[in-house]
Amino acid sequence: MWACILAAVLQYSANISLLFREVPLLERFAAARAAGFAAVEIQIPYEHPAESLTRAAQAAGVRVVLINAPMGPVAGAPGMACRPELRHLYRAELERACEYASALSCPCVNVLAGRTAIQERVACERLLIEHLSLAAERLGAVSARPLLEVINPHDAPGYLAADFVHATRILRACEPRVRLQFDVYHAARLGLDPRTTFIELRPIIAHVQFADHPGRHEPGSGTLPLTQIFDAIAASGYEGWVGAEYHPTADTLAGLGWMRVPALQG
């Protein structure tokens, strides 16, 4: 089953919003460390005080390398940074993201764009650029940077940054500290070769995530050539974290065979 052997030289983080859901969030830091992860990501950390998360991370001996900015008043929405009617809420919630990034010493904050209708796209893109640049300024004060993630339109219809060409154009107009969050799964879902897409975008990528495709489950569950994809990422000189952001098909530990193969131990 574990035909996928990932590159040993990469640093893997566990997205504990999706992995280790067998235990409460504050216990997932220790569960991730026990499974071999040195770092974690959290999609929505705001359910707990920043101090509680910091204590849990420190007790487990793991780094928090990525959080999401608050995503808006509607549960399940893919962000709000492009929405004009949420301008004031976005700015207030950005301060909360800064608070958490500072407490957790977290270097990256994913600022999701949000959805937009076709007739709104120009105005919404302009506001997204403004809000990402503001995030760069505010997060820079706590030694963090904002990221823009591409999310494919099949999984999130209407999402503004739905392809890498568009996202690249947005980033060129932003404050230079804003970078790209590259997800192998979303690249594959867009019908792209994640290897060549990553190499093309490498200069603007600050964080990588992965899941197999189809299904968005653990390595070995789908058809992606993850061995070759991660070899390409490692060969590029990328030194950031690579986040396991997938839905386990069963128990989290049962799906971590990809971490226990011999090539990963050396």
Image: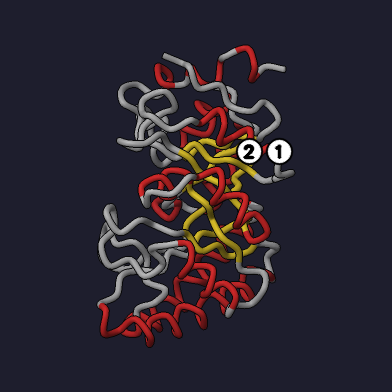
Looking at the image, which residue is at 59% across and 29% down? Answer: 37
Quickly name the residue at label 1: 235
Looking at the image, which residue is at 28% across and 52% down? Answer: 155
Quarter of the rendering containing residue 142: bottom right
Q: Which mark is residue 126?
A: none
Q: Is residue 29 left or right of residue 138?
A: left
Q: Are marks 2 and 1 in contact (CB under 8 Å)?
A: yes
Quadrant holding the C terminus:
top right
Quickly name the residue at label 2: 232
| Inter-mark Cα distance, 2 to 1 | 5 Å
Residue 85 in picture, x, y percent from top left: 31, 84
Quarter of the rendering containing residue 93: bottom left
The residue most toward the bottom is 123
Q: Amino acid at mark 2?
A: Ala
Residue 171 in picture, x, y percent from top left: 56, 72
Tell me, what colour scheme is on the image?
secondary structure
Please tell me whether residue 84 is drawn above or below residue 243 in the rendered image: below
Please tell me whether residue 70 is drawn above or below residue 107 in the rendered image: below
Q: Identify which residue, 264 or 101, lies in the foreground.
A: 264
Please tell me whether residue 188 is drawn above or below residue 127 in the rendered image: above
Q: Amino acid at mark 1?
A: Ala
Q: Mark 2: which secondary structure? A: helix
Residue 106 in picture, x, y percent from top left: 62, 53
